[in-house]
Amino acid sequence: MNSERESSVKDLDVLGVRELIGEVNEKEIQVIAFKLGKELVSVPIEQIVEITTNKDITPVPKAPSYVIGVMNLRGKIVPVVNLKEHLGIDFEISEDIYKKNKIVILDTPKGEVGVIVDEIVGSLKFFEDEILPEPIGTVGIEVRFVSGVVQLDGELLIILNIDSIFNREG
C-alpha cells in the first residue's frame, strides 16, 4: 500500500512539472483607474476598499488644507482628502464638493482614507513587466508618490504609491 501511495505522489509530481512547463510567470496587476484633473492615475485594486458617491462631508476646522473633511461610512469616521492638492496637481474646489463627489476609499498606512476624484475610468489589467519607472519630471507628481507608469493607447497611466502618499510620518 505504501508503494502505491509513493507511485501516486510521483505521478502528481510529474504532472505538476508538466503543467508548469509552458506556464508564463508574469504577474498580472489589476488597478482601478481614475482622473485627477488631466492626469490618469490608478491604485492597485488590493488597496481599494470601495468607491462611493454623494456622501455628506463635514468640514473639520484647523485640519491641513488638503483635508476636505470627514464622512460617516457605516459608522466609521473616514477623513476625505483632496488628493490633487496633496500631490501638487492643479485644482479648483467647486462649491458643491461637499455634496456631489466621487470618493475612492483607500486602505492606507493611516487607515481608511477617502479621496475625491473627478472621474472613475474603471478597472484595468496589465502585466507587471509593462510597468515602467516614471520618466523623472514628466508626470508632475513627485517621484516618491509614483510606483510606476504604464503606456496605454497614447496616454500614460500613473500608478500611485499609496503607502508613500499616506505614510505614518506625514
Image: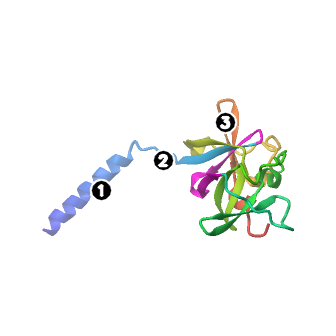
Position of residue 27 relative to residue 71, above or below, is above
The foreground one among 35 and 154 is 35
Whether residue 9 sits left or right of residue 31 in the image: it is left
Q: Is residue 38 magenta?
A: yes
Q: Secondary structure at mark 3?
A: strand
Residue corresponding to mark 2: 25
Q: Which of pointers 3 and 2 indicates the residue nearer the eye?
A: 3
Q: Amino acid at mark 3?
A: Gln
- Main SS category, magenta section: strand
Q: Which residues are magenta?
A: 37-53
Q: Secondary structure at mark 1?
A: helix
Q: How many marks?
A: 3
Quarter of the figure that contains the N terminus: bottom left
Quarter of the figure that contains the C terminus: bottom right
* Distance in Å between CA atoms under marks 2 and 1: 19 Å
Residue corresponding to mark 3: 151
Position of residue 124 relative to residue 62, above or below, is above
Which x, y percent locates residue 75? Answer: 61, 69
* Distance in Å between CA atoms under marks 3 and 2: 21 Å
Q: Amino acid at mark 2?
A: Asn
The foreground one among 118 and 139 is 118
Residue corresponding to mark 1: 13
* Label 3 Cα neighbours within 10 Å, binned few <14 / some 14-19 / many ≥20: few
Badge 2 or badge 1: first in the primary sequence: 1
